Amino acid sequence: MFNSGGIESPGMDDPLDGAETSDSTEQDRYLAAMQDLTAAMAASGTSFRERVEPVLAVGREHLGFPNGHIAVVSGDEHEIVASSGLSSTITPGAKTPLSETYCRHTLDKAGIHIVTNASESMATDPAYERFGLQAYVGATLRVDGSEYGTLCFVNDSEAIAEFSDWQRTLFEHLTQWVEAEIERELAVDTREQSQRLLEATFNSPETFIGILDADGNLIRANETALGFIDADDEAIFGESFWDTPWWNHDEAVASRCQDAVERATEGEMVRFEAEHIGADGQRISTAVVARPVAADGTVRKIIVEGTDITDLKRREEQMEFFNSILRHDILNGMTVIEARAETLADALGGTQATYAETILDWSRDIVDLTQKVRSVLNTMSDDGLTEAETIELAPVVEGAVNKAASMDEDCTLKTDIHEGVEVVADDLLDDVVGNILTNAVEHGGPGSTIEVTTERVGSVVRLHIADDGPGIPPAERDAIFEKGERGTESTGTGFGLYFVSVMVESYGGDIWVEDSDLGGSEFVVELPKE
């Protein structure tokens, strides 16, 4: 039966103390058990099971049980990880719901938990109904202060007598040793996982990595770097890093590398870009970082990492090419056309003047579109990113409203902008707001009403632009911000709202469309305050 909810072990008092009152037979049994246990603990084993199962065998022999096993408990799952004896019924890897195990009682109690006769005390218990074990002794295993599982010895056919003091002490020795082995195993697992993670990171297919000594000599390189130059590591290890095939194809590149390494030896982290030629003649561009690794204030190693940015550089070149076309060819040509159209519009009359005005309007629209495309290209280029700053919102809205109002003398524009409201943006914000307002005027119809308001929400400011136009169906609201998309009634390029979306995102903000209280659509532009 259960002994008063489990037996509390009385500390690890040596049962040989007080020998005058101890039974000599028990002393001899304890000494024999400790000798066998010491021998089993000293035996070498590669795996966790190889180390602990001989110890479990010693425990079950001297404690008088057919089986000893270790279980790990996770949530409601109980899994045996090592076992000695009764191999046909209790095997490593066997999993059982914790609610159907004897161990659940052990976990609920402190110290050693003993069931001497389960047929009497556990006849209706789910564990006894499932396994039918007649006797059980167990203790909770703790690792780093956390519950790990249990150490158990069981008898499948016979009840047992009470544990003597020497048996309790032996069991406590077993428990402490097993806990130490589990900690050791987990530490090994952690080291192995860290090593595997380190190796996986070191051999990333996207990054060249070299490790140098404090003098700048190469002592290790990853597979990606070695494969690029098709080099034998023994042939290049020990060489000055800048003299290796990654760098020595070009004197300027090698000099840049040497300078970075020498600065890294002084404790500085250095970044630069370089070009490399592979064994197959392939040329790539890399962003390189040379990082010092110091110990006790002294640089011991230098890690050099090169990330392939060839595609990025190619895209930058392409964007610069198209930007130059916009800047010089298209924009300059349209400026000439606009000037000539303006002259013709002033000089001509009647239908011809109307044609000239049409040419002038389209010219201005194309010039405006070209400038916006350039703005987007600039925001997508590392060299052309505009510097966001805190700016006052009211003047921006006022200028955009005045421009939109000039498009339709009958439209009504109302504003309610809180004084002193500032947002993080740049000098293109007036184009962002202007695009939304002109879009509302164009699609709202003659005499439309547009309201512009602001609200502060936590760390952001929301600019609301609402109209009483036909509105935008919910299914189309996300699509209108995509490249080249436009409403079903639109005759524009579909660029304006894409431009708006790109710019708002570059500010760290967001934009979306809701239903307006005026009956149409409401654009909400969310911008950070700082």
Image: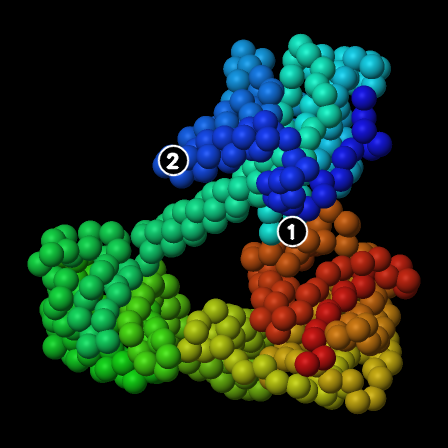
Image height check: is 62 above or below 34? Answer: above
Residue 199: percent from left, percent from top: 35, 51
Query: Label 1's element?
Result: loop
Question: Which quarter of the figure is the C terminus placed in?
Answer: bottom right
Badge 1: residue crowd in 10 Å (few <14, some 14–19, many ≥20):
few
Residue 416: percent from left, percent from top: 87, 81
The quadrant in which residue 311 appears is bottom left
Residue name at image x 49 percent, y 77 percent = 385
Q: Which mark is residue 173?
A: none
Residue name at image x 70 percent, y 73 percent = 527
Residue 335: percent from left, percent from top: 47, 81
Q: Which mark is residue 43?
A: 2
Residue name at image x 72 percent, y 87 percent = 392
Residue name at image x 63 percent, y 80 percent = 425
Query: Label 2's element?
Result: loop
Badge 2: residue crowd in 10 Å (few <14, some 14–19, many ≥20):
few
Image height check: is 137 above or below 295? Answer: above
Q: Looking at this view, is 34 or 327 the one in front?
A: 34
Q: Earlier in the sequence, mark 1 or mark 2?
A: 2
Which residue is under mark 1?
145
Q: In the shown orientation, is residue 386 left or right of residue 296?
A: right
Question: Is there any visible trace of residue 262 in the rendered image?
Answer: yes
Residue 350: percent from left, percent from top: 63, 77
Q: Looking at this view, is 336 or 93 the one in front?
A: 93
Q: Give the residue at the far front of this rendering.
A: 20
Q: Looking at this view, is 10 or 190 the one in front?
A: 10
The amino acid type of the residue labelled 1 equals Gly
The amino acid type of the residue labelled 2 equals Ala
